[in-house]
């Protein structure tokens, strides 16, 4: 079993992993809420339809990167780590964004309902992770999958 060494992670890797940790914590925070006068209620990320799936994919991107950098024996895939982490981060963030756009929201006569701070923090963590995953991808020199198999001219 590989020993985890924090020194093997550079600053970008640490931020990607941190964004995954923030996303994990946000799954337990309020993502959707309703308020009517003195009454209010919220639900966590696990209760917002498919939003939790996007959050889990964001978490998976960070876990994959940490495991890869720590020397774990991960199964080989046909894409490099830059492409894999970027794809997972992007897909997860897009799913959470779609859920945010499609979640009912509104207010009238002292009654309001809509997204709560857990969802907003998850979106922010996902965007940060995507930006740093893109930097990782660019610095790795990997090609995108649809360009990797093209013959050089």
Image (spheres, rainbow, N blue to C red):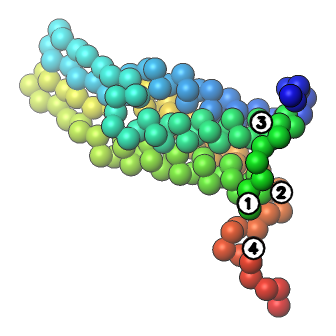
Q: Using the numbered discs, state the Cα–Cα distance from disc 3 to disc 4 in whole angstroms.
A: 25 Å
Q: Position of residue 140 (x, y in %)?
A: 83, 57
Q: Earlier in the sequence, mark 2 or mark 3?
A: 3
Name the residue carrying label 3.
Answer: 67
Determine if residue 13 is in view.
Answer: no
The residue that disc 4 covers is 148
User: Left or right: where does residue 15 sit relative to residue 33?
Assistant: right
For discs 2 and 1, the disc positioned in front in the rendered view: 1
The local crowd at label 2, few if under 14, some if 14 to 19, many if 20 or more residues have their Cα within 10 Å, is few
Q: Secondary structure at mark 1?
A: loop
Q: Secondary structure at mark 4?
A: helix
Depicted 137 relative to depicted 101: above or below: below
Up/down of 114 relative to 41, above or below: below
At 66% from the left and 74% from the top, the residue drawn is 146
Q: Residue at x 79, y 86 (%)?
A: 151
Q: Which mark is residue 140?
A: 2
Judge whether residue 121 can be spotted in this image. Answer: yes
- Who comes first in sequence, dot 1 or dot 4? 1
Q: Nearer the viewer, mark 2 or mark 3?
A: 3
Q: Element at badge 3?
A: helix
Q: How many marks?
A: 4
Which image quadrant for residue 21?
Answer: top right
Farthest residue to the left: give it: 109
Identify the residue under disc 1.
Answer: 79
Badge 4 local density, few (<14 within 10 Å), some, or many (20+)?
few
């Amino acid at each position: 079993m590989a020993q985890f060494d924090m020194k093997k992670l550079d600053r970008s890797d640490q931020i990607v992993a941190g964004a995954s940790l923030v996303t994990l914590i946000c799954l337990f925070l309020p993502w959707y809420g309703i308020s009517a006068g003195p009454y209010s209620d919220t639900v966590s990320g696990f209760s917002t339809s498919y939003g939790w799936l996007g959050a889990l994919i964001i978490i998976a991107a960070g876990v994959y990167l940490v495991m890869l950098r720590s020397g774990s024996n991960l199964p080989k895939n046909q894409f490099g780590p830059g492409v894999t982490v970027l794809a997972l981060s992007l897909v997860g963030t897009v799913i959470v964004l779609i859920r945010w756009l499609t979640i009912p929201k509104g207010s009238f006569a002292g009654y309001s309902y809509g997204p709560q701070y857990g969802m907003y923090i998850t979106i922010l963590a996902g965007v940060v992770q995507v930006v740093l995953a893109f930097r990782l991808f660019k610095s790795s020199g990997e090609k995108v999958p649809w360009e990797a198999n093209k013959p050089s001219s």
